[in-house]
Amino acid sequence: MPGCWRPIRTGRCATARAIALAESAVNRGPDVANHVDTLAAAHAEAGRYTAAAGTQQCAIDMKRAANADGPTLAAFAARLTLYRAGQPYRVP
């Protein structure tokens, strides 16, 4: 990504970089649901809501398999609802 060296949150460079970094984290720790959750958020930020929803569902399935607590599953499910509605996740 030439020319994408500035640490900026907005724009194509920033979202492409976020996806690349999240994919790298997932590749290094494919069994870490939080990495998968981050990748889903990056997809949503880039407007790739179908990819975000599918990725988030994988994160939820991973948390369920690990017997995650209710609040964690609820937070993951809330993000899935956002992605299915065509909205990115933003920390309040």
Image (cartoon, helix red, strand yellow):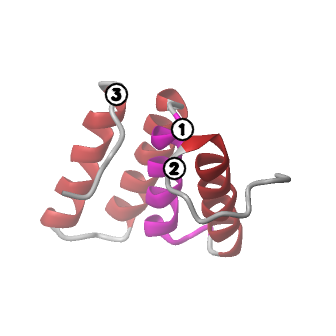
Residue matched to label 1: 46
16 or 79, which is in the foreground?
A: 16
Comparing labels 3 and 2, the label whose residue is closer to the camera: 2
Pointer 2 local density, CA inside 10 Å: few below 14, some 14–19, many at least 20? many
Inter-mark Cα distance, 2 to 1? 6 Å
Q: Main secondary structure of the magenta part?
A: helix
The quadrant in which residue 31 appears is bottom right
- Tell whether 42 sits left or right of 19: left
Q: Given this view, does label 3 or label 1 mark the residue nearer the observer?
A: 1
Rendering coords of residue 86 (x, y %): 36, 25
Residue picked out by circle 2 = 42
Q: Nearer the viewer, residue 25 or 91?
A: 91
Residues under labels 3 and 2: Cα distance? 14 Å
Q: Secondary structure at mark 3?
A: helix
Quadrant in the rendering for residue 34: bottom left
How many other residues sit within 10 Å of disc 1, few (<14), some (14-19) or many (≥20)? Answer: many
> Is residue 49 a member of the stretch shown in magenta?
no
Residue at 32%, 60% in the rendered image = 64
Magenta-span inclusion, residue 33: yes
Does the CB distance between marks 3 and 2 fall below 8 Å? no
In the image, which disc is placed on residue 29? none
Q: Which residues are magenta?
A: 30-46
* Tag 2: amino acid: Ala
Q: Which mark is residue 84?
A: 3
Apparent side of residue 48 relative to residue 71 in the rendered image (left or right): right
